[in-house]
Amino acid sequence: MPHYDENSRGPLDGVRILDLSRLVAGNMVTHVLADHGADVIKVEHPQKGDDLRSWRVEGVEIYWKVYSRNKRSMALDIKTDEGKDILLRLAETADVVVENFVPGTLERWGLGPDVLQGRNPGLVILRISGWGQTGPYAKRPGFGTLVEAMSGYAHLNGYPDRPPVLPPLAMADMVAGLYGSSAVLAALRHAVRGERGGQVIDLSLFEPIFSMIGAEAAQYQLTGVPSNRAGNQSTHTAPRNVYVCSDGKYVAMSGSMQSMAERIFTTIGHPELIADPRFRTNDDRVRHRDELDLIIGAVIATRTQQQNLDLFEAAGVTVGPVCSIADLVDHPFVRGREVIVELPDDDMGTLPMHNVIPRMSGTPGGMRRPAPRIGQHNAEILAELGITMAEREQEMPA
């Protein structure tokens, strides 16, 4: 079984990030950066810690354990004078601050960008909020669920004869986290070039997930008709769907290229469909996608999932199984590529979680330490600041 390696170094070794955020988006930002070597200090409330800790399964903080690996924890009440003083000292040593309070909150506490950058002009400050730092919704609290609904994503997700469907995971936060990590890297690159030092990054949850719906605005301008839910089908290419097999399992298939669609028709024993006016071009297939799905689905339903995979893969057709996590943990692809790593854990014995993403040939990331307990690194971090014993009243026993 692999073990944590505190000596592991990634391309962001030497970059210090203060993470004041709670829940998912900010933790996703710093999760990505910590995996690649950044020294991420989670600044948490001394009693309750990051709210992500409350997302428990069987009493175990699995979300915290996964998305806060490689981080250190500093228990600090930044609303007190002592806490503010220590935070400002930390800011002097940091490259980045990440926060996701309702806009105006840090300013009200006397910790706005002007104060932080007054202590450290080169500081990059990533500000995450539901609706952004400006605009008519700026002062509104915002959670991913609201953004997933209002952005147009939920309207497109699901089946046309059923209500809109929210994603079963924190999609808006996760996507914002990926945008946020790339924005931090861009700002750090700017600072390395010596161009005006630090800056403030304004990242809403709304805009990243809105970017996922692609060309919807342009399509609406052209047609005057909003796209509707299409289930597992696509309104742009056909065939594309999930099909049930004879053993009750499912396969997903996509024939988005003309050559692939023709290959599918031949493989299912219906080469005549290539010249059928209903299916001759992609536009034809999209218009008649329900009829096409009935033909393809009838063939797939006569074979088990594995028989279908064998048949289509041998023909070079783009097909894949629909898997649950139970299917994936021992899947040969997952095992062969080490998609999941298992590391020691005090509560579970071993903790399976996703590996570092992506794989870098020259400067790979790594697993340096497990997710911390609240305030686990107080003494260590305070000592790095040279803070005296009298100033350690904020320290929470690890």
Image (spheres, rainbow, N blue to C red):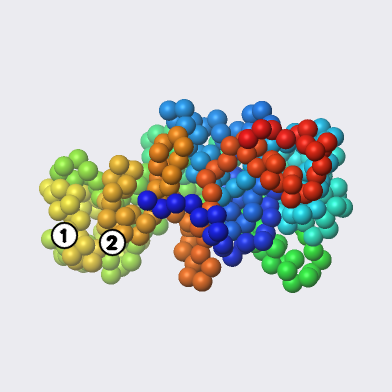
Q: Is residue 170 above or below residue 48?
A: below
Mark identifier at residue 318: 2
Q: Is residue 390 left or right of residue 6?
A: right
Instruction: Where is residue 42? Give x, y as percent.
Output: 65, 43
Identify which residue is drawn at 37% across, 44% down.
Answer: 231
Reply above or below: 246 against 182.
above
Asked which quadrant contains residue 257, the reply is bottom left
Report whether 224 appears left or right of 328: right
Q: Residue at x 53, y 68 (%)?
A: 363
Mark 1, other Cα within 10 Å: few <14 / some 14–19 / many ≥20: some
Taking 57 as reference, is 117 left or right?
A: right
Determine the secondary structure under disc 1.
Answer: helix
Residue 361 lies, in percent from the top left, at 48, 70
What element does badge 2 sit on?
loop
Residue that mark 1 sits on: 311
Residue type for callout 1: Leu
Q: Is residue 159 visible?
A: yes
Q: Is residue 392 above or below residue 330?
A: above
Pick whichever, 199 or 273, lies toward us. 199
* Numbered circle sitting on residue 54: none
Front residue of 259/84: it is 84
Quadrant (top left/top right/bottom left/bottom right) for the C terminus:
top right
Instruction: State how far apart marks 1 and 2 are (Cα).
Output: 11 Å
Residue in view at x 71 percent, y 54 percent: 96
